Image (cartoon, grey):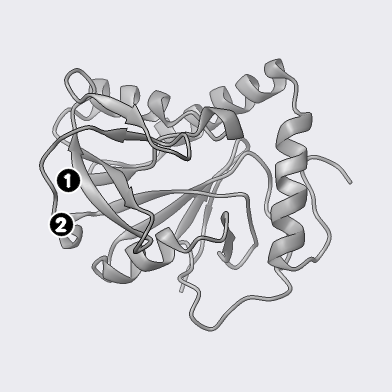
Amino acid sequence: MSRTHFFILEKQQLRQQAIILREKLTRAEFWQLNDALLKQFSAFDWSAIKTVHLFLPIVERREVDTFEFINFLKINYPQIQMVVPRCDFKTREMESIAFDPDATVLIKNKHQIPEPLYGDKIKIKSIDAVIIPLLAFDLKGHRVGYGAGFYDRFLEQCKPSVLKIGVSLFKPVKRIADPHDQDILLTHCITAEQVYEFLR
């Protein structure tokens, strides 16, 4: 199986295979993909966005380096308020905390996720775009994460117009075999090659 294509599989199979493919990437391949993702992210139209929620990467899991996205927004869209998640692993819910790249102190939680040590909570309904970590996604905008449901719960609380933007190291699969009726679909997904838009 190539690094840019999966067969039609169920979520758990896709999850396992995406993790394996990440691990097989050389250091050079991984950073080339990150550079290409930043180029696509930079070309996206952020002009109407006032508040954006960005996940912070788990380095040990070779997640997309969103610190590069943060640096781009800081320089090119200084008016955009950036917020990052802080997780409660008992309730499996996330808070949105105001993030200042120059001032916010980050610590890693028990799952190695960088989180703000302090900061103001931001109302979820004020968020205009959410950058979502992915392991896989399909051509209809269904997504596969780690399975804990943090983003499912979070997106349910967002306003209906929020942009739900996945970022993926790999191309989409044609179809995820076991989507759920309750799945919250992506509106967009950024890959190294292009930005996918899922029209409703």
Location of mark 2 (residue): 126
Query: Is 79 situated left or right of 3 in this image?
Result: left
Amino acid at circle 2: Ser
Location of residue 5 in the rendering, given as x and y in whole percent from the top left corner: 79, 49
Q: Would you say the residues marked 1 and 2 are in contact, meaning their CB atoms lie under 8 Å apart?
A: yes
Please name which of the two marks, 1 or 2, marks the residue nearer to the observer: 2
Identify the residue shown where x is 57% and y is 66%.
Answer: 142
Establish if 63 lies above or below 147: above
Secondary structure under tag 2 reads helix
Query: Is 144 situated left or right of 197 in this image?
Result: right
Amino acid at circle 1: Lys
Few, some or many C-alpha atoms within 10 Å of disc 1 (few <14, some 14-19, many ≥20)? some
Q: Quadrant of residue 47?
A: top left
Identify the residue shown where x is 63% and y is 28%.
Answer: 33
Location of residue 162 in the rendering, given as x and y in whole percent from the top left corner: 29, 61
Secondary structure under tag 1 reads loop
Number of marks in picture: 2
Q: Residue furthest bottom?
A: 181
Location of mark 1 (residue): 50
Seen from the viewer's position, the closer of residues 69 and 118 is 118
